[in-house]
Structures are given as structure tokens and as C-alpha cells.
Image (cartoon, coloured by chain):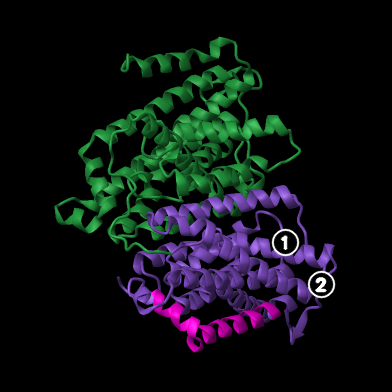
Chain colours: A purple, B green
Amino acid sequence: MQIFDIFLLESVLNGLLLGGLLALLSLGLNLIFGVIDVVWICYAELIMIGMYAVYYLHVSFGWPLLAAMLAGVLIVALSGMALHQFVIRPVLAAEPINQLLVTGGVLFFLQAAATLAFGIEFKNLGITFPPIVVGEISFSMPRLIAFGVALAGMLGMYLLLTRTYIGTAIRAISQDRAIMPLMGVNPSRIYLVTSALGGGLAGLGSCLLVLQYDIHPAIGLSFGPITFLICVLGGLGNMAGGFIAAFIFAQFISVGGFFLAVEWGYVIAFLFFIGVMFWRPQGILGSKQ
Amino acid sequence: MGKALPWIGLAALALAPFSGIGNYPLHLLIMVLLWGYVYTSWSIMGRLGMVSFGHGAFLGIGAYVVVMGWNHYGLTPWMGVPIALAVTAIVAFLIGYPCFRYKIVGHYFALVTLALSEVTRLLIVALRDQTGGSLGVTPKTALTDAAYSFAALQFSNKLVWFYVVLAVWLAGLWVWKKVDESMGRLALEAISQEEDAAASIGINVTRLKLGVTMISALMTCIGGVLYAQYQLYVNPETVSGIGISLQMVFGVIAGGMYVRLGPTVGAAFTLLLAEGLRLAFGNRFPALDSTVYGLMLVLFIIYMPKGILGAALDAAGQSKPRPAATPTGRVLRDG
């Protein structure tokens, strides 16, 4: 019984670490939705671009890992801006569901283009970290790094949104889209900056994921659905809600995976999500319309 | 002449296998009709403003319930189909009723149904001792010493499948027509434009939406059964999960959601594009077709939201004016 409890504790703590990572992933998506009112279904595919970028710059071109990661963040931020400029802008006035679908088309395109360009083989950086052992519990180093960086990233985003002019403008436009242009704020520019920030957060996420997981063209499908569901569970556009929801989901996955198989953890998390939707359609922290 | 044209087309289609086309074109024809039927099933609710990303669930239930019943309990598909339909109806009700009752629409509806299709896929994978997991499963063959087995719903002759699928596809189009002619369709169009206003003039929003969802889900389930029995192989990725659910949505968008043959045109287009590029380039560029397809989808949604057939009919000036995809009560933004 003693050993059993230690392993349970270990999976709870690992769930906590996973929660930090998921919270960071959902933050970018929430930011985009809160400000531009569009769900990037292809968000996880942007993360995939970042993972490939880091991999190729580091492994094929021999860049130092940190430089490759910085470049990866930049590349994904630029991809986010390009996505907004060329795909989202033309449909901003169309039916909301068309905006969801058009980014779904981008998902298909990026996934297929990655297969075409990089092949379907699994790639990884080939870096291994020694596990950190505290008492009888061992943690994986990349997970701890991911947790720390994710928290720092979220804090940075919080400061940016509350302490800077552009952050204030972003928050203002998410509160009232019709009035802000009258106040002399150019929404096109704010949208573009927000897309770059959202992309940058996806890029940061990809740097953390690339340390832990193999890269392949379909990797987006293993992170995409869960990221959307976290955002919806927390209340789309509500960053604090997404933060809490990420930790709830992570516990389901980690502890559910401990008692049963990994898939069961996901099944329980998704069923929980569907259940909550019927109880609070606006999300756990969302406000009533 | 205008009235006779569809019948001539249908007769030509029905006689197509006798024009001496080989096995491979016949297979393509079957796949176009089968997916055309599944896409049509999706559109029955999709075009009325309920964009579901969860139809992979119903397809998966159809395919797996019947194959599992046959493999593990020796249950003939003729018994398996009613069970699969019953399971589909229960799932569609469990997901649909609360969604419609609590007005989960638009993005939220799409994402809730997305969770449903992922749950189905993960369940199939998690129950790998029974279902074979990600590797998929083959129905136990009943064709070792016979060319066909009616009890097992297995036919080695593609011709039989062609007529089965043709009949089911026609039935799907007929259901579309019936839904289109019903009063419910007008009510549902009103709902998709302005739900509260529709409710205020006495439309029972929940019941109507649930009805159409049931029809669409049950039809999709039948599509799953046919797919499994025709291919004699299923795996969780091809019949459930986010991938196939999105593929359905996009096939419909490519063809055109608001015209009856649109989904079928979408199925033909996607299949022929994939096969055409494969024939042109061989297997040198494994994902070229999906790359081109993804790019075209994005362009379609931006510049041609009515799809190929919808745009073609508009150009020919035949299309009846429809209160189609216009923004409703949404603030225009100059983003």
C-alpha cells in the first residue's frame, strides 16, 4: 500500500507539471479568441511548425539549442501573423463558423505539407536529461523545465497585458470591438500584434514540447483537441479559466492514466468536459451571455 | 427535357458497371457514392446551421458495433445494424438534447461534438483487447468457400456493392428532399438565422434540432456499417476521431452544402483529386494530394463558400435564391 501511494503521488505531481504546459498552450489560443473572436483550429499545427524549426536548426544546421529555440518562437510568431493576414482577415466579416472552418483547412494543409516536406518519420532532438529524484519520487527534467518556463511565460503575458500600452489596447478591444476604433486604436494593427503574440506563445510551447516528445506531422492531432477543450472548459477567451481547466484536465489524464491506460485518462477528461458543458455551457469561469 | 435529365443521369450511372469499366474505376465509383452518402448525411444537419465535428462518432459506432458483434458473438450484421442504430440514437440524444436545450451553438457546438468524436476514437483504442486498437480489425471472413454470404453481409463481387451503395445513396438524397420539403426545414432555417426570434414565434427549437440530428446521425451510422462491410477492414483513425470528422465537413464545403448533389460532388472531387495526383506523380510525393486539397479548401472557404456545385449553379443562373450564409446580427469589423 505504501508503494502504491508513492506512485499515485508521483502521477499527481506529474499531472501538475503537465498542467503548467497545457495552461501555456491554451493561453495563446485564448488570447486569439478573446481579442479577435476566432478559434484557430490549426493552433497545434503552428506548434508543430515550431517543433520542426527547432529540430532542423539544431540538428541539421548545428545551431545552439537556445538560438534554435528563439528562432523557433520567432518563426511561429511570424506564421501567426501570416495566418491572420492571409487567411483570417478575408473572412472576418463572414459567418463565425466559416472562420472556424477556414483554419481547419489550414490544419489539413499544414499537416499534409509537413508530411510532404519532412516525411512521416518520427524525429527527436536526441537530448536526454537525467531524471531528478526527490525521495522516492522521480521527475523528468524536461517536464520541470516546461513547467517553470510555462509559468514564466504566463507571468510575462500577464505583465504585458496589464502594464504596457499595447496590452491595454488589446484588453480594451476584447471588451468592446465597436467602440475602440472610435477611440483612435487601429484594430487591424492590434489584431496583427495579437496574432504574433498568440503565435509566439505557440512557439514557446513548441520549444517545451520538443524536449519531451518525438516530432511527426500528425503531432498536432494529439495536442490540438485537448487544447481547444481546455479553452472551452475554462470559458473561451477567459485566460484565468483556461489556466484552471488545464490543471483539471492534466490531473484527469495523469491520474486516470495511472489507474487505467493512458487513453482512459483522456476518455474520462473528455467525458468530464462534455458533462461540464451541459452544466455550464459558458465554461467554468465564463460569464453568462 | 429538364425534368428527364436527372433520370437519364441516374440510368447512365446505374448502367455504368456494364460499360466495360474495370474493377478499379468501379471501386472508385463505389467509394464516391458511399462517401457521397455519408457527406449527404452530415449536410442534413450541417446546412441548417449545426456544424458537427462529431460525426466520426456515429460512423465509428456503425462500423465497430457491427464488426464486434460478428467477430465476438457471431451476431449477423442484420442483427448488428439495429443495435448500432440504437446505440447511435442514444449517443445522438445524449449529446444533442443538452446542447440544444442549453443553446450550445456555433463554435461551442462544434467543439463539444469534437470531444464526442475523440471519445469514440479513444474508446476504440483503449478497448484494444476487443477491438484490435490502432491496428484496426477485419471482420471474420465468411467468404472462404462462397462468393458471398448474405448472413454475414459480405460480398466478394463489387457489382453487388455498387447497387447496394447506389440504393443507399439514393435513399439519402430522398431523405434530404423530404427534409427540404418539410415545414421543419423552414423553421430550422429560421433557427439558424436567429434562434431566440424563432423560439419567440412558437418554434420548438430543441425538438426540431434533435429530430434532424437523429436523422443525420442514424444515416451516418449506416454509412459506417457499409464502409466496414465493403472494405472488410476498419481502424479507429479511418472511422472515428477528429481527422475523419473534419474530412466530412470539408468534403461537403468543397462540393457545396446548400445543393442536394453538393456533398456527392465534394466526395467525387476529393477522391478524384487524390487519385489523379497519385496517378500523375506516383508515390513520390505521398501527401501531395492532401496539400493541394488543404490549400484549395482554404481558398474555397474564403472565395467560394458555396462550394463547387453551388458556385457552378450560381454561374449558370439556375440556383434558387436562398437565405444562405449571410452574417446574422454580427458587428462588421474592419480587421
In the rendered image, which quarter contains the N terminus of chain B? top left
**Labels 1 and 2: the sequence-earlier one:** 1
Q: Is residue A249 visible?
A: no
Q: Is residue A249 above or below residue B269?
A: below
Q: Which span is picked out in magenta?
A: A145-174
Amino acid, disc 1: Tyr
Question: Viewer-proximal residue, B244 or A247?
Answer: B244
In the rendered image, which quarter contains the C terminus of chain B? bottom left
Q: Percent from the top left, x then y, of residue B111?
A: 45, 58
What subunit carries mark 1?
A: A
Q: Residues within 10 Å of mark 2 (few under 14, many from 20)?
A: few
Q: Is residue B25 left or right of residue A134?
A: left
Q: Percent from the top left, x then y, of residue B178?
A: 28, 32
Amino acid, disc 2: Thr
Per the image, is B212 magenta?
no
Taking the spot 42% from the left edge, 27% from the top edge, the residue there is B168
The residue that mark 1 highlights is A52
